[in-house]
Image (cartoon, rainbow, N blue to C red):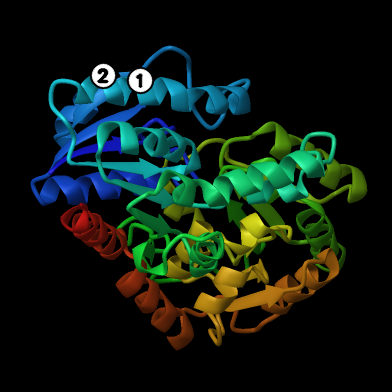
Amino acid sequence: MRIAFLTHEPFYPPSGGGSAEAVYLVEEMVRREHEVHLFCPTFPDAQEVARKFDVRLHEFTRWKMGRYVSLRNVKYLMYPRALEKMVRSAARTNPFDLILSQHTISAVAAGRLRKELNTPVVMNFLDFLTGFMETWPVWIAPPFLLKRLKQFEISLPSRCQADGVMTVSQPLADCFAEAGFPLARLKPIYYGYDVEMFPLRRHAPSSDQRPVVIMHGSFDQHHLGPVARDGLVGVFRKREDVIFKFVGKRTPALSHFLSSLKRIAPGIKTECTGFVPYNEVGKHLRDAAVGIVPYEESSGTHCAFVAKAVEYLGVGLPVVSTRLRNLAQYFEGERRIRFSDFTGDDFARQTLAWLNDPNLYAVNADARNLSDRVREHLDWCAISGEAIDFVEKTRHEFR
């Protein structure tokens, strides 16, 4: 097939969030000898990367795009029209057999193009983007506007008559089904990790060193709310020896969060690495005591399949997460991940339970078994294989 692959994120190197998945999906399509046309914002060494991955690159260069650029949300809103124009132009001389979009933003462009180009469209939703905005301040996300945005996003596949939809979780698939999209054309594929970059640690750090509670990611506003703040302060007040380490770019949200911690709990020990490439994150996780996912409750977080939890467990870390619906369903009964209520007090309680466990640093049978489970089912090879099977099936059934 001649496939147009659409994304609003620079393709390489992965910058966090869902961006890593694009690389593995492209590799799987190329491995199956599909001709992949990559439509995305420009990135460093773009032509060299395109040759390495054997893709035809269509670079967007009109303005800078990315997770950390200024006026990011405004640029995201403007991008679908520009992306639509690029794909339409490329299809004029040689039509595409299928359009595959990553994330909601590029799905808007793909949906508009489906009828015009008479080309099947598969939309891949790696999150419920507007659902995360439920925890934003009302002056940024007024309830009346947020309700309209959420309806727009969830109804997008039905309105555009997408031929297939892949989702990061079963709860997100359920949301699309409730909005009228046919169950038969929905495929939850979850979210993977690279087992080579996050191998099970052979030896845990020495119990004599100060314990490290670690979190990594893109550190957007919805990642660092009252649960995280009050939870970490609660841990510090019982265990002043703990170091709280943040692996990722020091965003304005993270800077504000760290300042609030210092103000509330003088003496709390924090570390921030700054941006770390995806292939180096695992090195930081191996020396930690506990991995945390202190997300606030929202429809966005309940529909997410949080990559950091999978990577923590792959390395062998015990995990504390708020009770996010999808994570709680997927890891129900697993002893290496503790779920808290959406309160700082309970999050601190669950984290302290791990820190005070005499077997905290043991790479035991529970750690090995769960690492094996995510390795088998959530390695990118498994995820991308299922995804492209679904893409090929969708194209075959297109009328």
Which residue appears at 24% of the width and 44% of the height?
A: 26
Real-space Cα separation, disc 1 to disc 2, in angstroms: 6 Å
Please state which amino acid type lies under the numbered disc 1. Lys
User: Residue at the top extreme?
Assistant: 62
| Residue 279 left/right relative to 93 | right
The percent position of residue 303, horizontal first and vertical second, equals 57, 61
- Which residue was labeled with disc 2? 89
Please name whichever residue, 181 or 81, is drawn nearer the observer in this view of the structure: 181
The percent position of residue 147, horizontal first and vertical second, equals 72, 47
Count residues near mark 2 (Cα–Cα under 10 Å), then give few for <14, some for 14-19, many for 20+.
Answer: few
| Residue 281 left/right relative to 12 | right
- Mark 1 in CB contact with mark 2 (< 8 angstroms): yes
In the figure, 26 relative to 332: above or below?
A: above
- Which residue was labeled with disc 1? 85
Tell me the quarter of the picture where residue 241 sits: bottom right
Let me know if residue 273 appears in the view: yes
The percent position of residue 222, horizontal first and vertical second, equals 69, 47
In the figure, 200 relative to 115: above or below?
A: below
In the figure, 262 relative to 205: above or below?
A: above
Which quarter of the rendered picture does the N terminus lie within? top left
| Residue 136 left/right relative to 129 | right
Count residues near mark 1 (Cα–Cα under 10 Å), then give few for <14, some for 14-19, many for 20+.
Answer: few
Q: Which mark is residue 49?
A: none
In the figure, 386 relative to 223: above or below?
A: below
Instruction: Say which element carries label 1.
Output: helix
Which residue appears at 71% of the width and 71% of the height?
A: 351
Tell me the quarter of the picture where residue 38 sits: top left
Instruction: Say which element carries label 2.
Output: helix
Let me know if residue 130 appears in the view: no
The percent position of residue 220, horizontal first and vertical second, equals 65, 41
Please state which amino acid type lies under the numbered disc 2. Ser
